[in-house]
Image: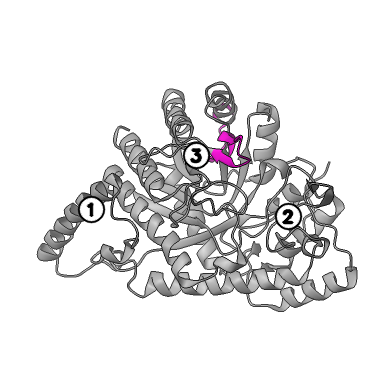
Amino acid sequence: MSYEIWSPDSWRLRVAAQQPNYPDEGSLQQVLHALRRMPPLVTSWEVDRLTGQLAAAAAGEAWVLQGGDCAESFADCEAERIAAKLKVLLQMSLVLVYGSRRRVVRVGRIAGQYAKPRSQELETRGELTLPCFRGDIVNRPGFTLADRQPDPQLMLRGYERSALTLNFIRALSEGGFADLHHPENWDLTWVDHAQESHRYQRIVAALGDAIRFMETIAPVTPADLRRVEFYTSHEALLLPYEEALTRRSIRGTGWYNLGTHFPWIGERTRRLDGAHVEYLRGLRNPIGVKIGPNIEPDELLELVRILNPENQPGRLSLIHRLGADRVAASLPRFVDVITQHQQHVLWICDPMHGNTVNTGSGHKTRRFDDIVRELKTSFAIHRQSGTRQSGVHLELTGDNVTECIGGPRGLTEGDLSTAYQSILDPRLNYDQAMEIAFAISEELANG
């Protein structure tokens, strides 16, 4: 199979998994035409800067913190919820910077994570069977035929919500919200009980002393103390939408998906001859690919060579999502084949998706202990292999949810119904996310 000729629409010659069937082709084409005329959401300069920072992370000079909702909701595009997600990621990154003495590259699952792959095409409730819900950008969660009919107009709403979210994030990042002199801006109002919060406040106090000392001996304040770079990411699942936001750089440096900084391919859509691999291989963006335990090492090697043919550092992240019980058997085989063939990749651990279980009450959940166990096992495997784990990929929220079992508050299965708000997969709450940050910080401090 030839991979030499690429264009933003060459994916249409391949089998495209996980795509909705739009009933009105004319309406679909009108929406795509409108999207192609819209301004880009990010710039190629930002994208290239992220690639450089990911290369630095792969070299051990930084750490990648990627996190956010499993699937964004249009209804969550509001100031308080967006700020809450940033607050959690900023607090986590401060813990990581303090413990590891490394820069943190902050990447949100935000401003575009509106489409989700599904294991089943249909959903049955009682005697009624309808198409499954594929995310707000495709159809609606209500269980009626009208709700579940794919609607191309939702792509326009997805673009608009992404633009609004990005605009607010940029305003916060540049306007003093992220100023290290005022980390109190990052406090969540409902957090007043957590042990992790007290540990975090001790770090804030120590960093405040360090900043005051530095400014005493060097009166010029570095700009990095007053602002923060924050990048966006989402799964490049809905290919017509992604194609419509793919633009040629005005600098002549190639084609970019300018709907996000960091698109990734999911475990269900990483087929070597599939449309998603074909689409992402031609982009100049740094890209990720989710790797589960069922991929063979030779297949992984070929996938890496297709997606990063120039073997460019920072270009490709392998986001392994293996599960706590399978990581020890699977990850060493993957690391060995990549190392043996001297491929430049960034290793990121996703300890969430391989540890999802269903409860008797009908909730999907994840056990906090399994999440931590997979994360720590991954660190140990990379140390033994002489490679480097350079990032983590988490589903988390700034809301006070009870979706994952265990953690600092000792949540049980009986607590899930208290505040289970996710429309799809369970997320870490504040206490759990901060405990993860402290665990990673300790691993990084130990080398």
Relative depth, front residue between 314 and 445: 445
Q: Which of marks 1 and 3 is in front?
A: 3
Q: Which of marks 2 and 1 is in front?
A: 2
Of the residues shown, which amino acid type is indicated by label 2? Phe
Which residue is most to the top?
A: 329
Q: Vertical placement of 170 versus 1: above or below?
A: below
Q: Please indicate, yes or no, whether residue 344 appears anywhere in the rendered image.
A: no
User: Which is nearer the N-term, disc 1 or disc 3?
Assistant: 1
Asked if marks 3 and 2 touch (Cβ < 8 Å), the reply is no
Left or right position of 434 against 12: left
| Image quarter (top left, top right, bottom left or bottom right) of the C terminus | top left
Instruction: Give the extent of the magenta segment.
Output: 339-365
Relative depth, front residue between 73 and 244: 73
Secondary structure under tag 2 reads loop
Relative depth, front residue between 435 and 334: 435
Secondary structure under tag 3 reads helix
Q: What's the CA distance linking mark 1 and mark 3?
A: 31 Å
State the residue position of label 1: 201
Question: Residue 29: image x %, image y %?
Answer: 84, 72
State the residue position of label 3: 414
Q: How crowded is mark 3: few (under 14 residues within 10 Å), some or many (20 or more)?
A: few
Secondary structure under tag 1 reads helix
Q: Is 358 colored magenta in this rendering? A: yes
Left or right position of 416 against 433: right
Question: Residue 376: image x %, image y %?
Answer: 42, 30
The residue at 72%/74% (across/down) is 35
Left or right position of 155 against 130: left
Of the residues shown, which amino acid type is indicated by label 1? Gln
| Image quarter (top left, top right, bottom left or bottom right) of the N terminus | top right
User: Which is nearer the N-term, disc 2 or disc 1?
Assistant: 2
